[in-house]
Image: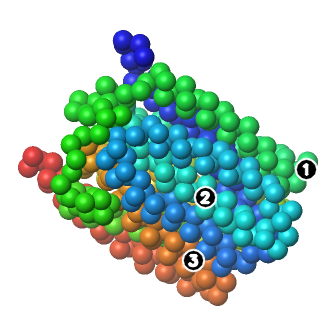
Amino acid sequence: MSATPPPAWRVVWWFGFVSLAADMVYEGARSVYGPLLAALGASAVVVGLVTGAGEAVALVARLAFGPLADRTGRYWSLTIAGYGLTAVCVPLLAVAPRLGAAGLAFATTMILLERLGKAVRSPSKSALLAHVASGVGRGRGFGVHKALDQVGAFAGPLVVAAVVAVASLWWGMAVLAVPGAAAMLLLLTLRRRVPDPSVYDDTPPSPERPGPAPRSGWWAQAVGAGLPAVFFRYALAASLTTGGLVTFGIIGYHLVTEGLVPVASVPLVYAGAMAVEALAALGVGLAYDRTGPQVLLVVPVLVALVPALALGPALAAVLVGVVAWGFAQGVQDSTVKAVVADLVEPARRATAYGVFAGVQGLLAIIGGVGAGWLYERSLVALVVAVALTQVVALVLLADTLRRSARLRRAG
C-alpha cells in the first residue's frame, strides 16, 4: 500500500468500473429472464415469483450480511465473495436447456444464487463506497458510481441481444463469463490498491478492523436495534416504491407473449431502460446534493405510471413505461442509498443498509408475486393496486423527510 491513498474521485471511478463489468453480467441476464424462463416452461406467475423472489433474496439476505460485515470488519472479503457468485452463476444458465425437465429448477436456482451474491456484497460495498464518497459529496459519489454501473447495465443487454440474434439465448448467457472475469480482476486490484477506504471519511473505524463488540445480540443487530426511528420510517416509505415497481421480468414476458417484439429485441428495450437509469442516477444525485432529499418524491409518481403504460397493448406506450421504469429504478438504487448514509452513523451503516434492503426485499417478493398474479387476471386491478400503494408511499415519504429535516435543524 502506498503512503498516500489515491484521490477519492479516482477510487469512486474504480468502484464504478468494477460495477460496470459486473452489471454487464447480471443485467445482461436480467434483460432476458422473462423470455428465458418462458422458454423453460414458466408461466407469468412463475416469472413474477422467480424474479420477485430474486429481488427479495438480494435484499432480505442483507439483514444477515450487513451486521456480519460490521461485526467482523470483513467488508472487502464479503464484497469479493458476492461478486464471485455473480461471475459464476450467470454463465451457468447456459446449460439449463440441456437438463430437460430439471432445466427450470436449475435456472431458478442459478438466478436466486446470483441474487444472493448481490446480498452478500451490497452492504459491504455500500459501506466502503460511503467512506470514499464522503470526500466528494455523497449524492455525487453514489450518483457517479451508479452512472458507471449503468454503462455496464446498458452494454450487457446489447451484448446478449447481439449473441441471441446470431446464435441463441443460451450462448448469450455463456459469453457473460468474460465481463465476469474482468470484474473480479478489477476488484482484486482495487482491494490491493485501497485496502482501507475509511481514510477518506472524517469519523471512520478501519473497514478491515471490527469495532468494539456490540452489546446486543446478532438478531437484534440484524433487525436494526439501536438505529434511529426516522431511518425505519424512511425504509418503509422507500420499500413501498420498491414493492410497487413491477419487475422487468414481467415487462419482458409481456413484450414477448403479446407479440410486441421478438425475443432478440427484449434486451435492447432493457438496455434503453438502463441508459435512462444511468442518467436518472447521475442527475438526481446532483440534485440531491444541491436541493436535498425532496427530489425523491418523484419516485412514487413514476412507479404508479409503470404498469399502466408498460403492460399495455401499444408498443409506443410500453416504451414510455419502460422509460418511467428505468428512471424510478435508477433513483431507487442510488440516491435512495445516500439518504441512509446521512441518517445513520458510519459504524452502523452496513447494518443499516442490510436492514433497509431487508424491508425492501419483503415488499419486493410480495410485489413480484402480486404483479404476476394480477397480470394474468386483470390489468386494471394491477394498475389500481400499484397506484394506491404509491399514494401511501408518497405521503409517508414526504412526512419522513420533514421529520428528518427537523431533526437535522435541531441537531
Left or right for 150, reference 213: right
Q: Position of residue 7 (x, y in %)?
A: 40, 19
Numbered label attached to residue 113: 2
Outermost residue on the top side: it is 3
Q: Residues within 10 Å of mark 1 (few under 14, many from 20)?
A: few
Numbered disc 3: secondary structure: helix
* Viewer-side residue, 164 vs 375: 164
Outermost residue on the left side: it is 410
Instruction: Name which quarter of the figure residue 53 lies in.
Output: bottom right
Residue 247 in view here: no
Camera-nearest label, 2 or 1: 2
Q: Residues within 10 Å of mark 2 (few under 14, many from 20)?
A: many
Outermost residue on the bottom side: it is 377
Q: Given the image, on which type of amino acid does mark 2 rest?
A: Leu
Q: Position of residue 373 (x, y in %)?
A: 61, 83
* Viewer-side residue, 310 vs 340: 340
Q: Position of residue 177 (x, y in %)?
A: 73, 42
Numbered label attached to residue 167: 1
Q: CA distance from mark 1 to mark 3?
A: 32 Å
Residue visible at 57% across and 69% down in the picture: 52
Upstream in sequence: badge 1 or badge 3: 1
- Indicate the quadrant containing the N terminus: top left, top right, bottom left or bottom right: top left
Residue 55 in view here: yes
Upstream in sequence: badge 2 or badge 1: 2
- Residue under circle 3? 369
